Amino acid sequence: MLEFPAMLYGSSSAILRKVRAEGHWWAREYRKTGAFPQPRQMRQVLPGEVLVVRPGAEFDLNRTRWWMHMFVGVFTSVDECVPKEERQRTEDAFESFCLSTPWGALYHVVSPPPLRSAEHMANRLASVLRFWDVLQGLRYAFWFGKKYTLEELMEDIYRKTLEAWCPGGPASVREHLALTVDRMSRATREDCLEAVLRMMPILAKEDTDLKHREVLGDPGFLRERLCALPLKDFEDFSSAYKYTVSVQLAAWDRELGRH
């Protein structure tokens, strides 16, 4: 029987309150015991049930359903109860705890918080692979009007990442993910650089909002810019997670516009 935290089921306003309260409770428990317990209340998720995993995928916020993306509120409320100097350690411990659960693994892959480094994303993707069999029986609202299978969801979010790491990999998304996780988990900075360089020209070509697409599609320019980035900045997209890679391209595009 698959169970998710009951706080994520209901209307969006009720969930906001519950998520905040649960985050505070988790923080208190962690500070007392050094571990995060399971959520106080769980609810069965039935096969074929729809999970809203992204803002804007459903507009009727008062409708009772699973609003998975609202789990984001937990992070803020946990941080509120933890001294600043302990936050990083607490966040790392909380992510490890979440990745040991199907609901936490799903959240961290659909809405990965910083850093989106190769190391972090390899762990997150590996956790979804561990829970693949139980998660594939559900349906996922990611774009408005569409209900994805797990395979379709991962295809939408990660196909470009998979191709960047393992060009021409297996047709099966699950197998391609497994191969990518293996490469990502052992990647050097140069491996990450090459993966990002494979992705960036494709994104630059597709993004019609960019004003300097030709320059941003030039591998020489991209390599030079990537090598000049501070390590911490590069680490936030060293996994070739397409959304953060796109953010970096947009930043360079604005910079080029100022010259």
Image (tube, rainbow, N blue to C red):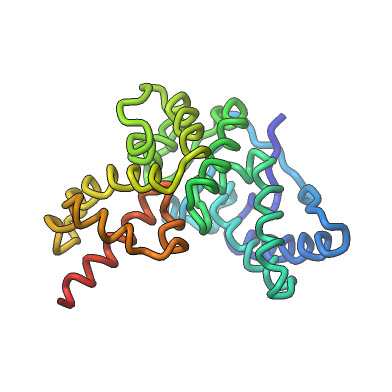
Dividing the picture into quadrants, the one containing residue 79 is: bottom right
Could you say where residue 10 lies in the image, as x and y percent from the top left? Answer: 63, 53
Could you say where residue 88 lies in the image, as x and y percent from the top left? Answer: 65, 64
Q: Please, which residue is most extreme toward the bottom here?
A: 258
Q: What's the residue at 72%, 29% (across, down)?
A: 1
Could you say where residue 113 lies in the image, as x and y percent from the top left? Answer: 53, 57
Q: Please, which residue is most extreme toward the right here?
A: 32
Report whether 14 appears left or right of 22: left
In the picture shown, does residue 30 fall above or below 168?
Answer: below
Q: What's the residue at 70%, 38% (across, down)?
A: 3
Q: Nearer the viewer, residue 6 or 90?
A: 90
Quarter of the image where the C terminus is located: bottom left
Dividing the picture into quadrants, the one containing residue 106 is: top right
In the picture shown, does residue 136 fall above or below 96?
Answer: above
Q: Nearer the viewer, residue 11 or 149?
A: 149
Report whether 140 appears left or right of 241: right
Q: What's the residue at 42%, 51% (across, down)?
A: 238
Dividing the picture into quadrants, the one containing residue 44 is: top right
What count of labels does the image hold?
0
Report whether 84 appears left or right of 194: right
In the picture shown, does residue 240 fall above or below 175?
Answer: below
Q: Nearer the viewer, residue 103 or 100?
A: 100
Q: Nearer the viewer, residue 33 or 119?
A: 119
In the picture shown, does residue 43 fall above or below 81?
Answer: above
Q: What's the residue at 46%, 56% (across, down)?
A: 235
Report whether 259 appears left or right of 99: left
Could you say where residue 40 lies in the image, as x and y percent from the top left? Answer: 80, 51
